[in-house]
Amino acid sequence: MVTRLRNTADEWRSLVNDMVSRGAQGSQSDIDNVVLYLSTNFGPAKGAAPSFTQAPAPSAPTQTAPAIALSPSAIANAKRVIAQNGCVACHRVGDEGSYIGPNLDDVGTRRKADEIRAAIVAPQPQVQPENRQVRLVQHDGKTIVGKILNQDGYSVQMVDATGKLATYSKSGLREFSIIDTNPMPSFGNKITGQDLDDLVRYLSSLAEPGK
Amino acid sequence: MKRSILALLLLAGSSLSAQVTYDRMLNADHEPQNWLTYGGDYASHRYSTLSQITKENVGTLQLKWVHQFRTLQKVENTPLVVDGIMYLGDTSQISAVDAVTGRTYWSYNHTVDPRGVFVLPMLKGLAISGNRLFWATLDGHLIAVDAKNGHPLWDKVVAVWQKGYQLNVAPLVVKNKVILGPATNEEGANCWVAAYDVETGEELWRFDTVPKPDEPNGNTWAGNSWIHGGSPIWVTGSYDPETNLTYWGTGNPNPGWNGDVRSPGDNLYSDSVVALDTDTGKLKWFYQFTPNDEFDWDSVQVPVLVNMDWKGKPRKLMLWANRNGFFYVLDRTTGEFLHGSAFVKQNWNVGFDAKGRPAKAPGHIATYDGTFIQPGVQGGTNWYSPSYSPRTGLFYVSSWQNYSAISAKADATWKEGERYTGVGKPKKPDWTRTPPNAPLFKKESEGYGAVIALDPKTGEKKWEFKMVDYTDAGVLSTASDLVFSGGKEGNFFALDGRSGESLWKAGMGGTVASGPMTYSVNGQQYVAVCAGSALYVFGLPEMKAAK
């Protein structure tokens, strides 16, 4: 029921503090993450529409990370965090990584810092429609999973994790399933403190060439 | 000797350039090689008795030629074909081209006033009578052009764009009259259906789609709201020679998304079909599909006129799949409501009374915050031409299934030269189940386009051909039980008219937002459709080499 509420960050902070005062358990970092998740996804204007299957549009940030210049060591640390946590198993950064998840090369132009932080520590349960994957099962039982690039009534155009572009005829399939659940696990317990700050600032700095 | 050769040449010439008479239009089904009106015939069946292209050979259709329009806009044109010559156009140029090769005989240009900004910058088609083509231009001119050489014969301003009007309809010619009406540019300019003399352009009669307060039904507008009631005309009507009535669908009232100023009242004759005496323009009957509309559900669909048995008795009917999501059967002599059933998911109408008045669902009204409405603003269908096949007895129409929108209103004050819509911004979260800006990634539950076949006797859906994306395409059916249509996915396809099975398709590289048509020259059948900003013509491969 609470997810039907729509509150500002301060209102969520007050509500969560109230719950803590009544005995809710969690470290200060956990509590901060809960407030961040709630205010990002259930903010006053836009956000999740829990009654429906559609993933919410990106919301306006309710907190703004301080603009701190990225030092070479912070960039190096962020790249280390990316490598250690296997982000490129799904995402692509530079010349590395998979094509299944959203490309991170331009994530700084698409998402605000707080949205990136929320996506790492408390990913939304469903992906944006443009990031949906599809599972195809051909008549011979072969299964293909990839990201939809395009489709019509007759065929679907996909890219798989390796970057292979292919068109599949829908008449050759016994199953065509759109997957809108978010495969991204929470890294809230794995990437914390300075590592999280460096990663968020680094990703926020990644912009589409020319923008 | 010399004289007799000349006589022979004149005779041959006249046989090649026979004029399009009223009699020919009345009997359009006797010359299926031609396509003489927007809907193919006066009854607007968009059905052809041509049968050379069959279920067996349709899979071998080949591209024969392409006509590129001088626009980057999508093209909604349905061409005319008369004796091997095709007439077609966009908003700035019309042309006569060879229907076999696509080579241009002539073009005639009209520069639309560049100060005008129009909500529907398209041309649906032309009309022909005798040797005259009639072109209704965006900026309000009705121009008669000599079909032989493209020279203008007369040019009348019939609607002043500076007052909020535009023309984008294919006119309908009946006897000596060119019949059409203007659309308002959503500027609250009151509209009409009018008849103009084919010879001179003189206005012969006019029917106002918004009556004045002292006229019949003038009391259906609260206060002075009738002054800016809109109720536009932007899709071609039909004609029934048996009743001498011409039928036209009317668009939404203004302001379209906020009914407060218009309430209480039904706001006649918005969102209606009006049946007008073709000789006088007098109203014989009307039926309003959506009283006091706040969802922009123009009733500008093409009236499809059918004679068939209704509950055991032969009856003259009108079939109508409306933007509001309901399929209607009316008696076209009297306007009597005979049937109404939803052909898409809808949540606004809980039923009809005996006279066909819908009972609006409580709470399903436009609000400042926004209300979840099915179908959405583009409707269950829209202006896309449906088709009726007398062979299958089915009514084919392009539809938007599982489609919804949030209807939000805002305060509206009329100001000259400005849009008068009352459209608001939803304040609630985006409830619409259609992912915005992601039509290619959506699931069926979030909306899809479909060509559907309805049994007009029951409204029952006989089959459905699904597309992922929605469709703005019209439908053509033929005597070999083929159904041609397309959609936003950019495919043009042929379906089995009895099962909906896909038999052939071509990727057009642009949205199909026009009504397909068919014609033949020298015994060879062609199928033509506009996609993107070009017209594509297909035929069978065994056809003779192009001349």
Image (spheres, coloured by chain):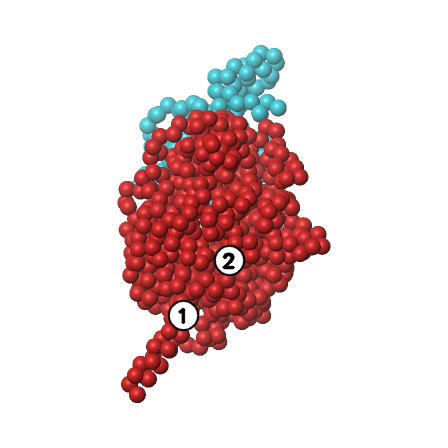
Q: Chain of mark 1?
A: B
Q: Chain of mark 2?
A: B
Query: Could you tell me how far apart the alpha carbons at marks 2 and 1 are, in whole angstroms?
Result: 20 Å
> Looking at the rendering, in which quadrant would you find the C terminus of chain B?
bottom left
Residue sitting nearer the eye, A50 or B262: B262
Q: Horizontal and vertical percent for residue B530?
A: 43, 58
Q: Residue at x 55, y 40 (%)?
A: B288
Q: Horizontal and vertical percent for residue A191?
A: 49, 30
Q: Secondary structure at mark 2?
A: loop
Q: Residue at x 30, y 88 (%)?
A: B1
Which amino acid type is shown beneath numbered disc 2?
Answer: Tyr
Give the left or right position of residue B337, taking residue B76 as reference. Answer: right
Q: Residue at x 35, y 53 (%)?
A: B201
Quadrant of the rendered image containing residue B481: bottom right
Q: Which mark is residue A201?
A: none
Task: Return the residue at label 2.
Answer: B42
Q: Residue at x 54, y 45 (%)?
A: B284
Q: Going from the N terminus, do you reach mark 2 or mark 1 first?
A: 1
Residue sitting nearer the eye, B143 or B481: B143
Mark 1, other Cα within 10 Å: few <14 / some 14–19 / many ≥20: few
Residue extending furthest right?
B312
Q: Is residue A13 above or below residue A73?
A: above
Which amino acid type is shown beneath numbered disc 1?
Answer: Ala
Which chain did the renderer colour red?
Answer: B
Mark 2, other Cα within 10 Å: few <14 / some 14–19 / many ≥20: many
Task: Return the residue at label 1.
Answer: B18
Give the left or right position of residue B491, taking residue B395 as reference. Answer: left
* Palette colour of chain A: cyan
Q: Horizontal and vertical percent for residue A168?
A: 54, 57
Residue extending furthest bottom?
B1
Give the left or right position of residue B352, taking residue A191 as reference. Answer: right
